[in-house]
Image: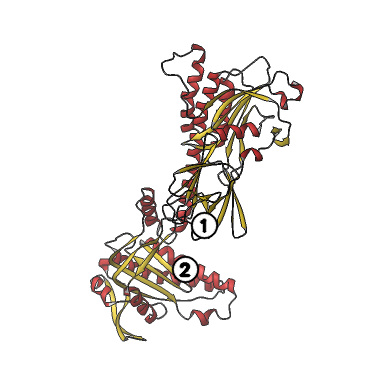
Amino acid sequence: MRIRYRHRGHEKIFDRLLDVVVLGRPRDGVHVDIDLTPDLRVSRPHARISLVDGAYWIEDLESANGTEVEGKSIKGMGKVRFSPGERIRISETILEVDNPSAHLSASWAYQDSTLIDAPSPQVDIVESIGVAQALFEPGKGIDPGRVQDLALLYELPLRIGEEENFDRLLQLMIDALVDVIPSADRGALLLEDTVSGELLLKAHSPAGRPSIDMALATRAMTLRHGFIWRARVDHDREQLANQINSGMYVPLTWKRRILGVAYVDNNDAGSHFSTDDLRLMLAAGHYVAMAAVQNNLQNDLRYSTVLLNRLLTNFSPKLRETLLSRAAQGRLRTGGQRSEVVLLEADIRGFTQLTSGMDADDVMDLLNDYFSALIEIIFQHDGTVDKINGDAIFSVFGSPEPDPLRYERAARAALKMQSGMLEISQVRRSRGQVTCAVGIGIHCGEILHGFIGSNERMQLTLIGDAANWTTRYCAGAGPGQILISPALHQRLWRHIDADLVEIDTKHEGKLPAYQLKGPKATMR
């Protein structure tokens, strides 16, 4: 369906092989095919245009400001039929559905994989079957001569399940169709590109010289009919593109969606396609469409998995697997919970002065050398990186998944981080590079934590005073030091070696803290 729409002098064109198009503004849980933002008086959604048996219909979806066709409001009238070219008004947006026949190329032929213009042959449509019609007559006995057809229909689902390479699967399918249909000399499969909407030649048999009439292909998809065509007997056969005598085109449909077209043809004037051939072709086309949908879903899943993995880079591999599993089951949702977690902040001491005379690339190398090791240590102890703010890392233990060992793991992670800093500094010093040290503060307390945003874009957020207190202890820690709060010391005193100290704060005055020196034997 091709729709032109204009808003305040800006015109856009929607051109996709869809028979139902929803117009409006999107929101969570509401899909629109044509987004009419920034027209803010458009509802979410607003209207629906559908193509049924060649006729166009429009329906106002209970919008706030209504829909007009040629100046007449259709709000509350249900589905209203209209013609291509009639003006549709939705708020300040004007839309027109183009007549599809005006955009059909006269004919196209593929020769040696090169697209060239070719004159369209004069043809007759001698048989036509809609995709919604029954493909086989109930109660009719099986023609012994068509047993091979049924074998193909049994075999295609098996091939779909076994063949992992989608392009190779499509080639196998068209090879099988050309082989099984007695009158077929050649065939091809065209599928709609999911991004551009362009029809792509995905497979053809035999190799070399497929011929495709795009006007006939578009007819099959627009009318949702498979059909047999023959060249008119009074036509000069020498003028036919690639000497084609007759052929079949069928749309590839899945759940009322048009995905492409399949065709076969022949060069023999004495050989014709039958109704049974067309029914077989339509049935096989359903399998091709099913394979295409399955391939698209797999591609979407792979893309979503990669994207989700990137979004989950702040989580340890163990937590990442848990969250991916929850997402796959539809259980990774926005929402928060209150619970006690352990917060750890590590900050480079004297970073501004340290890097004042360094090149930007050298500063980034320094941060990458130290922070990549520190983040890996946090992950090893099942912590989550909440954020990296310049020269500081803020992490949490016990979120988003509960962890009964979060207190001990945070302390172990801090000790390992300081030893890791020494190791990295030793390597950098041997290279003549600038080194640094971090101070670490750890605190435990109740916070509100969870994912905020939408299902399309969510992030882990921590809300509560515990984060501010953690920053206080981190600010009080000198280079190479780890300071923990009294609240955390109360839980770990039997397992750690720590000295009571005082730190100065800007607003609270002096605060008690414990300098963590190492674990006792029970914590090792």
Foreground pick, 71 / 55: 71
| CB contact under 8 Å: marks 2 and 1 | no
Q: Position of residue 220 (x, y in %)?
A: 58, 31
The label nearer to you, 2 versus 1, is 1
Residue ranking furthest to the top: 144
Q: Position of residue 478 (x, y in %)?
A: 40, 81
Q: Is residue 191 left or right of residue 234?
A: left
**Kind of residue at badge 2:** Phe
Whole-number angstrom distance, CA of label 2 to CA of label 1? 53 Å
Residue 404 marker: none
Position of the N terminus, as image quadrant, is: top right
Q: Which residue is mark 1?
A: 91
Q: Which residue is mark 2?
A: 371
Q: Is residue 118 left or right of residue 25?
A: right
Above or below, 255 against 229 in this view is: below
Q: Position of residue 142 (x, y in %)?
A: 46, 14
Q: How many marks?
A: 2
Identify which residue is drawn at 35% across, 75% down.
470
Above or below, 406 against 358 in this view is: above
Foreground pick, 24 / 244: 24
